[in-house]
Image: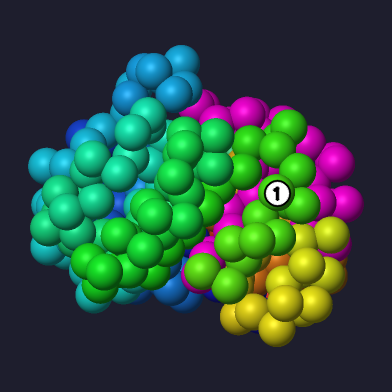
Amino acid sequence: MPIIAPSLLAADFLALGKACNMLNESEAEWFHLDVMDGCFVPNISYGLPIIEQIKSTTTKVMDVHLMIVSPEKYIAAFKKAGADILTVHYEACSHLHSTLQQIKAHGMKAGVALNPHTSVDLLKDVIQDIDVVCVMSVNPGFGGQQFIEHTYEKVKALKKLITAAGAATLIEIDGGVTENNAAALVAAGADVLVAGTTVFKASDPKQMISTLKLAK
Ligand code: DX5
Ligand code: ZN
């Protein structure tokens, strides 16, 4: 069964507390939190104070996805705000290995996100150091986009790479995940499914989370 990580980017921000309570009552294990800086991606979302308040509502895993330049500057700040997993973009890190070590030194799990054009092969020499690879199945920056079909090939290749290295890295899929592609993603090797629009625009979000959880 996949881990379900609903993205609060698609929630009603005027009713964020209600959205958090819904997730707390649901089968979702992680809260997926998308931080955008208007520089690495062409959009701005929310940041530290919001994450700190969300953390106060839950004991579930806070999965923070940084779509920002120079993420290494903010490791301590996101730890303080409540991140359990801190994911940085491969494309935003000149010294990825060092950044991953710093994230772990702060007591968090370390994630690396890959844009659709970035090959999973580039992670070969650092896979042992990564707790979660976030495979972007849309171009980062916006919720509600169309799933990129090439993702399946990437997930299969990544799964091979992880198995060959004997690593325990989880594969997370982010963007355009629905009840229609969830099972195929899990079959390809996905461990974690992020879902924003699919969960929060559903008539019964909690039920949708349960449906995604059954994907196999
Ligand atoms: C996109 C974000 C995603 C986004 C997913 O840049 O990283 O986490 O919220 O949204 P959906 O599930 O609507 O594609
Ligand atoms: Zn995300």
Which residue corresponds to the image point at 71% horizontal and 66% vertical from the top-left?
190
Q: Is residue 24 visible?
A: no
Which residue corresponds to the image point at 51% horizontal and 69% vertical from the top-left?
129
Above or below, comparing residue 77 to residue 129 in the picture? above
Which percent across, then down, holds residue 191? 64, 71
Is residue 103 toward the left or the right of residue 185 in the image?
A: left
Is residue 123 toward the left or the right of residue 59 in the image?
A: right
Which quadrant of the structure image shows residue 159? bottom right
Q: Is residue 155 magenta?
A: yes
Residue type, numbered disc 1: Leu
| Quadrant of the image containing the C terminus | bottom right
Which percent across, then down, holds residue 198? 58, 46
Which residue corresponds to the image point at 22% horizontal and 43% vertical from the top-left?
74
Front residue of 34 and 124: 124
| Quadrant of the image containing the N terminus | bottom right
Which residue corresponds to the image point at 73% horizontal and 32% vertical from the top-left?
117
Above or below, comparing residue 196 to residue 205 in the picture? above
Say what secondary structure mark 1 lies in: helix
Which percent across, then down, holds residue 128? 58, 72
Q: Disc 1 designates what residue?
A: 122
Which quadrant of the structure image shows residue 172? bottom right
Is residue 36 toward the left or the right of residue 180 in the image?
A: left
Is residue 67 toward the left or the right of residue 143 in the image?
A: left
Q: How many marks?
A: 1
Which quadrant of the structure image shows residue 9? top left
